[in-house]
Amino acid sequence: MRRHLAFTSMALALSIMLGVTGQARATGPVGRLATPMPRPAGVSPSDPTDTQHGFETISFANASVGCAAGNGLIICTADGGLHWRTAYAGGAHILRLRFTTPAVGWAVAPSLLLATTDGGRMWARRAILPGLQSVDFVSARDGWAVTTRGLFVTHTGGARWTFAPTPVPPRANAVSFVDGQIGWMVGAGGADGNQFQVLRTTTGGRAWTRQWTAPVGDIWPSEKAQLLFTSTTAGWALLTAGGGCASQEPYVLYHTADGGGHWRAILEGGGACRGTGYPRGLSYPGPDGYPGPLAAHGPLAWVVAASPAGGTEEVAATRDDGRTWTYARSIPTGAVLPIGAADFVDAQRGWVATGGEVEHRVVAADGTVRYHLGGRVLYTTDGGHSWVAQASI
């Protein structure tokens, strides 16, 4: 059974610099707990502009090896977060991380793919793919890349990529594979071309079959949909509205137990601005606020959400494929607004990487207030009921 993590960015529209060298050497240790880390190049706490340099993504290969990344920075640990090192400090805005093994991992920036073969100690440029949005690898050699130009496949570890035609519509917005042949794709389709659809392949992406169209209205943008399969039968789909109101964003979490043939709504969040066809009366409400990336591991899954106005941060966890849920609300207040990403390695141990928190306030001569925003990595050993800060930028 293969472990998955959703690679979803909270800020795809941010601009980036692609001044990337072939390799970036690791620097010295970052420090422990609240010890600040070196800032990305060009960022100063006295910058008189609104800047955000929090984390976009986090991924752990096991309980020891993992990395967190964001705007121009990747930090990694080999001891479960006790110590963190700056592994990359280039110009790329890292949006997603993915480990295939404890040694092999991938970092995605718009149009740029980086790779590591030593557990994150060093990262090298692997490919330039215009419009790159996400990748999914099932081995060190076999992977798929979602781009604005379509879907591409590699069997050379990312060194060479081949275009993989998909039905139009939908164009792939996210893919999830469980081996070299069986996978799923989410994209926009339906009568008006603006509905969430799931397709399945058993040929490694050479041919696709439509399986399901979500019963929701056209406010649900497929480009924000999250799709995760943890086996050939069990999968998760998280739909979000693409915008919020009243300090929350409507979302619905669906689950399939038959390989995508049938889906059931199992969790819902945000009641102030629900859209057409929104499920009603589900047994378990989802966390209020803006949802972050979905994490799943076998029958285990986690949904993390934060409400800036409500001052709440909550983790919803299931151990039985979504039939029952437990909740934890004790993430340190203000530390996860917004949530960049989350990852868990088992039912108890997990990490949250924050997308930014107020770190420095500057009042300009005209009275305008500006902020610099940083991010943190927090760790839980009790399924999200309590958290400890491990690193900050």
Image (cartoon, helix red, strand yellow):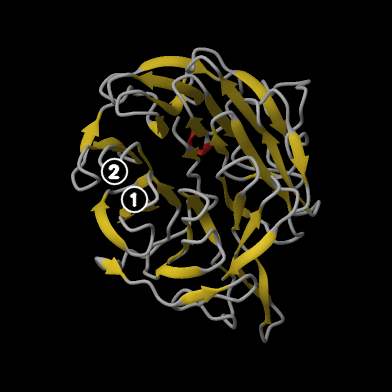
> Alpha-carbon distance for marks 2 and 1?
7 Å
Residue type at mark 2: give it: Ala
Cβ–Cβ under 8 Å for marks 2 and 1: yes
Q: Which residue is mark 2?
A: 140
Image spot of residue 174 (x, y percent): 43, 35
Q: Which residue is mark 1?
A: 104
Image spot of residue 268 (x, y percent): 71, 30
Residue type at mark 1: give it: Val
Instruction: Identify the residue at image location x=49%, y=32%.
Output: 228
Tell me: 318 left or right of 40. right
Is residue 274 among the parts visible in the rendering?
no
Tell me: 134 left or right of 290. left
Is residue 115 among the parts visible in the rendering?
yes
Q: Is residue 297 above or below residue 308?
A: above
When asked about the image quadrant of residue 48, the answer is bottom right
Instruction: Identify the residue at image location x=34%, y=36%.
Output: 138
Q: Quick one: SS at disc 1?
A: loop
Instruction: Identify the residue at image location x=54%, y=67%.
Output: 53
Between discs 2 and 1, the one toward the N terminus: 1
